[in-house]
Amino acid sequence: MSAHDVHHHDDDHDHDDGPHSTFSGYMIGFALSVVLTAIPFWLVMNDVISNRTTAVMVLGGLAVAQILVHMVYFLHMNGKVEGGWTMLSTLFTVVFVAIAIAGTLWVMFHMNTNMMPSHELHGQLTS
């Protein structure tokens, strides 16, 4: 065995072969997914939260929690797999989508302010 073979062998120990899944890990993820689906369903079907804004915030928070459960337990996303590139690309995607959604909502919210009011136009056409 040469020095090159020993060095190459040491490099293999540092390389992560990917996620190592277990049955219990999948069962924990499945149980959390069922709970995070059942709770919002129960909240909506029984009209537990009467304030619409609060309901949207609670349901949105539970949706984000379910996304994180799926990413960790089923997609095996962590900072170690593929040298962290998978996590970095996911974070970039989340930031990009958040900017796109925020910009779209900003434009739609301010559209009436920046456009000609329709009631003045309607008044001119009928006189």
Image (spheres, rainbow, N blue to C red):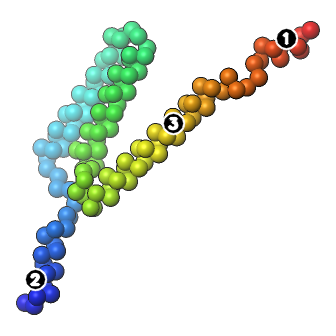
In this rendering, position of residue 108 left or right of residue 92: right
Q: Which residue is mark 1?
A: 123
Establish if 3 lies above or below 33.
below
In this rendering, position of residue 24 left or right of residue 41: left
N-terminal label among 2 and 1: 2
Label 1 SS: helix
Q: CA distance from mark 2 to mark 3?
A: 52 Å
Instruction: Name the one closer to the observer, 17 or 115.
Output: 115
Q: Which residue is mark 2?
A: 6
Establish if 39 lies above or below 103.
above
Q: Amino acid at mark 3?
A: Ile
Label 2 SS: helix
Instruction: Write the residue at 70% across / 26% down.
Output: 114
Q: Amino acid at mark 1?
A: Gly
Establish if 127 lies above or below 21.
above
Q: CB under 8 Å between callouts 3 and 1?
A: no
Mark 1 crowd level (few <14, some 14–19, many ≥20, 10 Å Cα): few
Q: Residue pushed farthest left?
A: 1
Question: Image quarter for residue 4?
Answer: bottom left
Percent from the top left, x then y, of residue 92? Answer: 41, 50
Mark sitting on residue 101: 3
Instruction: Write the residue at 33% across / 27% down.
Output: 61
Label 3 SS: helix
- Number of labels in the image equals 3
Q: Amino acid at mark 2?
A: Val
Instruction: Write the residue at 38% across / 54% down.
Output: 89
What quarter of the picture does the C terminus occupy? top right
Percent from the top left, x then y, of residue 106? Answer: 57, 30
